[in-house]
Image: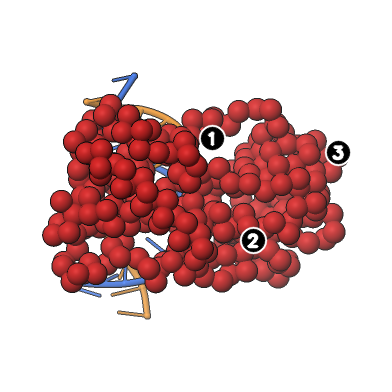
Chain colours: A red, B blue, C orange
Amino acid sequence: MPELPEVETIVRDLICLQGKTISEIVELRPNTVINKTQLDLTEKIGTIKSIERRGKYLLFVLDSCLMIIHLRMTGKLIYPADKNSIGKHTRAYLLLTNGEIVIFNDIRTFGKIELIGLDDKHNTMATLGPEPLTEGFDKAYLSNICSSKNTNIKTILMDQTIVAGLGNIYVLESLYRCRISPETMAKVMTARQIDKLVKEIKIVLLKAIECNGTSISDYRRIDDKKGEFQNFLQIYGKKLCPLDHPVKRIKQGGRSTYFCPECQK
DNA sequence: ATTGCTTCCTGAGCGC
DNA sequence: TGCGCTCAGGAAGCAA
């Protein structure tokens, strides 16, 4: 399930596409490519000027428009690839003018490729909160948010309008490392806890990027290699915490939460 | 306005 | 062997 470190890894892996030109987006499953009419098909779709990341979104800045890809849980990009690699779960592929292709596979089909004008605002991206690895995400910012919200800290950190790019794995890992219970109401978080949490989130994300992400189930790099951060997980998916206490599993907002009631108060 | 629940989808894993 | 059930999950959309 790609979160910030996984998407960042994919963006870095795709840097070799910069300067190449897309001639066609071939949609194999309906509703995979949104606003395809944005493209002027009489022209080349466009040269890839840059590939960037915002939250969990991949942004292809083309000279004609912006192509936004969200992988959701099971979306994968494969490059280099050839047509023999197109399979049952291939939802679309990009055809380049040099004959190469970039395959978009997605088992659960929640992923999307969306095209918008260079100056248009994307309805969700426009509401994203700050990037967690920038100075805009600091203790003052998170304190202010926490004081005004009537929910638990895990739900706060999962909210993309508050901070963009965190998902279940990195939120739970960060909370465990800070010894903060995910059930703690945001309002009662102390200044010290919030400071520690902000710092730990940055440490965990940087380490996960260095490891090229977490390959627990579906996530793979564009060459199908796994990330390595699953080797450093302390709480997500575990039966015992690193101190051998039993890990408790609950649901918060319909999502699995793993935590150690002994370590996290 | 804010919070929370349901929905989308497929494959894996389980019990019987 | 195979059926039916549950679960995984981001975020849109809707309900309270």
Relative to A224, is A49 on the left or the right? right
Amino acid residing under circle 3 = Thr
Q: Which of B4 and A240 is in front in this view?
A: A240
Q: Nearer the viewer, residue A225 or A195?
A: A195
Crowding at mark 1 (Cα within 10 Å: few <14, some 14-19, many 20+): some
Q: In which quarter of the image is residue A231?
A: bottom left
Residue tagged 1: A125
For the point 55% across and 42% down, which residue is it?
A54
Instruction: Please state the horizontal and vertical placement of residue A141, each as a whole percent of the image.
Output: 38, 33
Residue ID for mark 2: A13
Question: Badge 3, how many Cα within 10 Å: few under 14, some, many 20+?
Answer: few
Mark 1 or mark 2: name the one nearer the start of the chain: 2
Camera-nearest residue between A21 and A245? A245
What type is the residue that disc 1 sits on?
Answer: Met
Q: Where is residue B4 in the image (x, y as percent from the top left)?
A: 24, 36
Q: Give the label, 2 or 3, closer to the camera.
A: 2
Element type at marker 1? helix
Q: Residue at x 80, y 51 (%)?
A: A19
Task: Identify residue for label 3.
Answer: A42
Name above or below for residue A127 compared with residue A52.
above
Q: Is residue A245 above or below residue A253?
A: below
* SS state under label 2: helix
Quadrant of the rendered image containing residue A86? bottom right
First in residue order: circle 2 vs circle 3: 2
